[in-house]
Structures are given as C-alpha cells and as structure tokens.
Amino acid sequence: MGGTFPPLARRRRAGVVLWAMPVVVAAAVAVAVLPQILDRGMPDAPPLGQIWMATPRTIRLLSGDDPKLTRLFFDRPTSYALSGGWERATPALAWASSTRFEVALAQSKIPADVHTVMYDPESWSFTPIWERRHPEEAMRLFSDAAHHAGYRVVLTPHPGLVEVSGADCHRETGESTAAAFLRCGIIGEAARLGDVVEIQAQYLESDPTAYRALVLAAAQQARRANPRIDVLAGLSTRYASDPAVLMDAWSAVSDVVDGHYLSVPDGIHPEIAAGFLHDLADQG
C-alpha cells in the first residue's frame, strides 16, 4: 500500500512538474492529490475472484492490521468464516471427528445460520483412531449425514493420514507422504463425496515447486472424481518466514485452485499473513 508520490516520469506525463511550479500552486496540487495516494482503494473483489476461508480469530487478527483488507477477502458470501460468524462471510463449522458431528446433528446443536460443515480428519488425537485408519469410510459417513440434513460439505483430509499405523492405505518404504497421499486416492474420494475440498499442502509452501506438484496432482484427481468440486489449497503462517513465502506459494497454484484456506495457527505471525494479503490486493 502506497504512501509515496508517483514516479517523476508519470508526473511529467500528466503535465505536472512540481519543481517548475510556484510554491503556492505546488502546495494546492499536493493537498488535492496526496489523500488519494495515501488511501488507494482496494479492488472490488479478491484477485481472480477466489474463495477464501479462515477462522474468525484469524480474520480479527488481520482486521487489526487493516479492516479494509479483511473486508476485501472475507466480508463476502463467497468466503467462509470457519467456527464462527464474520460480517457477510458464509458461516461454517468444523469437526475433526465424524462421530462427534453425528452426535451434534442428533442433538440439534448446530446453529441455525450454519449451512456448511467441514470434516477435518488428521493424524492427531482429535480424530478417533478408527476414522484415522479408515478415512474414506469416515468421510462417507460424515457426508451422507450432512447432505441428508441439507448441509454443504467441505472435506479436508490431511496427507499425514497415510502415516497412521494400520491405515487402509499407508506410505510405503521410500515413498514420500505426498506421493502416498496421491496414490491412495484420498482427495479424489473426498471430492466424490463433498462439495468443497481443501488440499492441506501448506507444509510444502516454502518450496513452491513441491507445493505446486502436490496441489496440481490432487486438484486433478479431485476434478476427475467430481468436475463441480470447489478446490482450495492451504496456506499457513506456521511454515512461512515472510509474506513472500505465501505469495510464491499462491502464485505457484493460482491457475490450479478456486481459492485458499488461510491459517494463522495459535496467532503465530499474523503480520506475515497481513503482508501477504496486502501484496495480493495490490497485485489484484
């Protein structure tokens, strides 16, 4: 975002050569032009019209840096506020356990304004061991229950599921986690069952080539399974040392995905996410 004057060549093209003007005229021009320069307007929509997803906590952290920035990326129905409402963003709720979602559904504990639900199975304690070992069946149970209740479904199986002992499909010796995840076809099954998938490739974002390779292959797999699927890719400040890391990762897949889930886990370095979105808004 700019607080500097336009280059001298541009000023000459506009016929305004301040050093040649009387002081009074130069001051008048500065008064008229400076506010516009200091307060450049944001674009009308996110670059490429992409979908953006984040938690309200992340959005609040970014809003503290620049409210206009969060309005651009998140104050719109095409964006998702995960686990809480935010302005005009579509509210959504997430579960790491399909079983717990079904309990919440049976007990009518899902707020009436929520029409989108996410299932996030990962190799962590929040996902029951049976679901970790059988992610495709767990995704089917979640999606069937959610769709039957009228919800839009987001599925975001983590590549680390192939590392789970006793999993239906697991990483072979000498195989990378990304390669095993693709071979197991987990994201393709997620796309067949859901309405939106997120590719959790953020752990590779500091290597744009590797990040693109996983996101591209997973997106292709997802769209073969469901041509109507919305494909998001993960971005996180956990793996970014500066805004350029996120920008390079975004640029590597801007022709591949429909949008991104932006994470600032545990409030780690929100200034990196804000800097990235500022750069992206300027580019857009």
Image: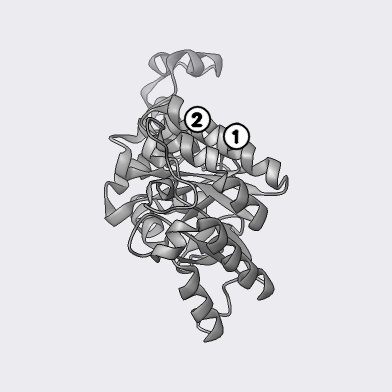
What amino acid is labelled 1 in the image? Val
Residue positioned 36% across, 31% down in the render: 206
Answer with left or right where residue 148 lies relative to residue 98. right
Residue 31 appearing in the image? no
Residue positioned 50% across, 29% down in the render: 213
Rendered view: 44 above or below 10: below
Residue positioned 41% across, 38% down in the render: 177
What is the secondary structure assignment of the residue under circle 2?
A: helix
Looking at the picture, how far across and down is residue 191, in whole percent?
63, 50
Crowding near pointer 1: few (<14 within 10 Å), some, many (20+)? some
Looking at the picture, how far across and down is residue 105, in whole percent?
55, 80
Tell whether label 2 touches label 1 (CB within 8 Å): yes
Q: According to the image, label 2 marks what residue?
A: 212
Residue 168 appearing in the image? yes
Looking at the picture, how far across and down is residue 159, in whole percent?
44, 45
The mark nearer the N terminus, 1 or 2, is 2
Q: According to the image, label 1 marks what residue?
A: 256
Answer with left or right where residue 153 lies relative to residue 170. right
Mark 1–mark 2 distance (CA, rounded to whole Å): 9 Å
